[in-house]
Amino acid sequence: MKGMISIEYPEYLANSLRLSNKDFESEIKTSSLVKLFELGKVSSGIAAKVLGLPRIEFLELLAKYKVSVFGLYDEDDLSEDILNA
């Protein structure tokens, strides 16, 4: 089963990014999944599958958006892991 999301946007928005409508729609889909991953809402595997990419390519794509492959894993989490090791 597939769902569809329709987003209304002014044409000048795509034009301001110098993207065709198709490329703009792809950018919206990709950036949405990157953000959902960053927030810990979806796994990298799910995001990659939705985008039709191998997982490693999705992880490489995160660098373009300046998102850590570790998601919400931060310095405090690392310190806690070290203490528990």
Image (cartoon, grey):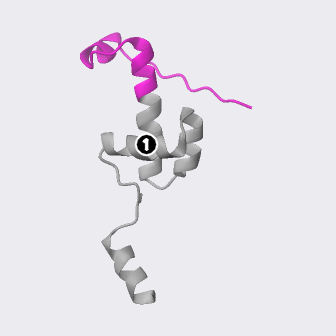
The residue positioned 41% from the left and 51% from the top of the image is 38
Q: Secondary structure at mark 1?
A: helix
Where is residue 31 shown, x and y percent of the image?
40, 36
Is residue 70 positioned above or below 59 on the image?
A: below
The location of residue 27, given as percent across then percent down, is: 40, 27
| Segment tinted magenta in the rendering | 1-27
Considering every residue shown, the one lying at the far left of the view is: 16
What's the residue at 31%, 39% (across, down)? 64
Q: Is residue 30 magenta?
A: no
Where 46 falls versus 68 (above or below)? above
Q: Is residue 5 magenta?
A: yes
- Of the residues shown, which amino acid type is indicated by label 1? Val
Q: In the picture, which quadrant includes the N terminus?
A: top right
- Asked whether 74 or 39 is in front, the reply is 74
Q: How many marks are shown on the rendered structure?
A: 1
Q: Is residue 6 above or below residue 71?
A: above
Name which quarter of the figure residue 70 lies in. Answer: bottom left
Q: Is residue 72 above or below residue 17?
A: below
Q: Which residue lies under the disc numbered 1?
A: 34
Would residue 40 appear left or right of 60 to someone viewing this image?
Answer: right
- Give whichever of 70, 11 is nearer the camera: 70
Picture quadrant where residue 14 is located: top left
Residue at (45% x, 33% y) in the render? 30
Q: Give residue 18's quadrant in the image.
A: top left
Question: Which residue is at a point 39% across and 88% down the rendered structure image?
Answer: 83
Q: Nearer the viewer, residue 57 or 13?
A: 57
> What x and y, as percent, mark residue 76?
34, 76
| Quarter of the image with the C terminus in it | bottom left
Left or right, 75 with respect to 43, comes to left
Q: Position of residue 19 (x, y in %)?
A: 33, 16
Dot 1 surroundings within 10 Å: few (below 14), some, or many (20 or more)? many
